[in-house]
Amino acid sequence: MIEVVAAIAVGLALDCFSAAFAAGACWERVKAFTPLLLAASFAAFQAGMILLGWAGGSLIEVAAHYDHWIAFILLAAVGGHMIWGGLSGEPMGCEPLTLRLLITLSVATSMDALAVGFSTPFMGLEVVSMSVAAGLATLILAILGYFMGLRVRGLAGEKASIVGGAILVLLGLKILLEHLAGAT
């Protein structure tokens, strides 16, 4: 069972890895604690959404019909803004890290965790273990993603916001298409 929990946890964390990668590629001159703050927020939302999904039961079934659209819209909006800023010729088209942006990215990347939380008991998995594993995997992969994004920023220079924005838009599209393909 531990292998199943680990695989699900890493699978959930990969969206956060991608978003953190985009952030690392885009943001410049951030405080030293920014990568940890970003990763901790992603991890807390992943773990919390699993618990919420478990506790929410039938409400989560209703939300599952719309969660992929919400994630897509949020990620496409943030990513589109980054791309627009990068193409406008202004120095770095990245939105600075604000509480609003942090929560937007955290919610958008943790929508799948609701469904996992709801289905955890049906898979014979312990919800607290699943939540902790997803939180830890997300924390580690988001920090790794952020620093890998910084490396790309060094290579892409001022156009890194276009790369980061494209990653977020593609991540949103991936989430949307996965859910739509599963709904047919």
Image: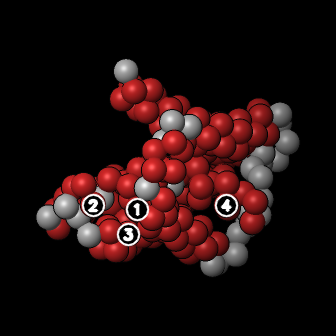
What residue type is disc 3 on? Answer: Ser
Rounded to the nearest whole Å, what is the CA distance between mark 2 and mark 4?
A: 28 Å
| Residue assigned mark 1 | 54
Q: Residue drawn 75% across and 66% down?
A: 99
Q: Earlier in the sequence, mark 4 or mark 1?
A: 1
Of badges 4 and 1, the one in the foreground is 1
- Give the mark nearest the N terminus, 3 or 2: 2
Label 2: element kind: helix
Task: Judge left or right: residue 89 versus residue 11.
Answer: right
Measured from the top left, where is residue 43 in percent x and y? 49, 68
The vertical placement of 76 against 104, above or below, is above
Q: Earlier in the sequence, mark 1 or mark 3?
A: 1
Label 4, residues with CA under 10 Å away: few <14, some 14-19, many ≥20: some
State the residue position of label 4.
103
Q: On residue 131, which mark appears?
A: 3
Disc 2 designates what residue? 121
Local SS, label 1: helix
**Residue at point 72%, 57% (across, down):** 101
**Are dots 1 and 3 in contact, CB under 8 Å?**
no
Q: What element carries label 4?
A: helix
Foreground disc of the pair 3, 2: 2
Q: In which quarter of the image is the N terminus?
A: bottom left
Amino acid on which disc 4 is placed:
Ile
- Asked which quadrant contains residue 50, the reply is bottom left
- Amino acid beneath label 1: Trp
Structural distance between the alpha carbons of marks 4 and 3: 19 Å
Residue 139, given in percent of the width and then of the height, sits at 45, 70
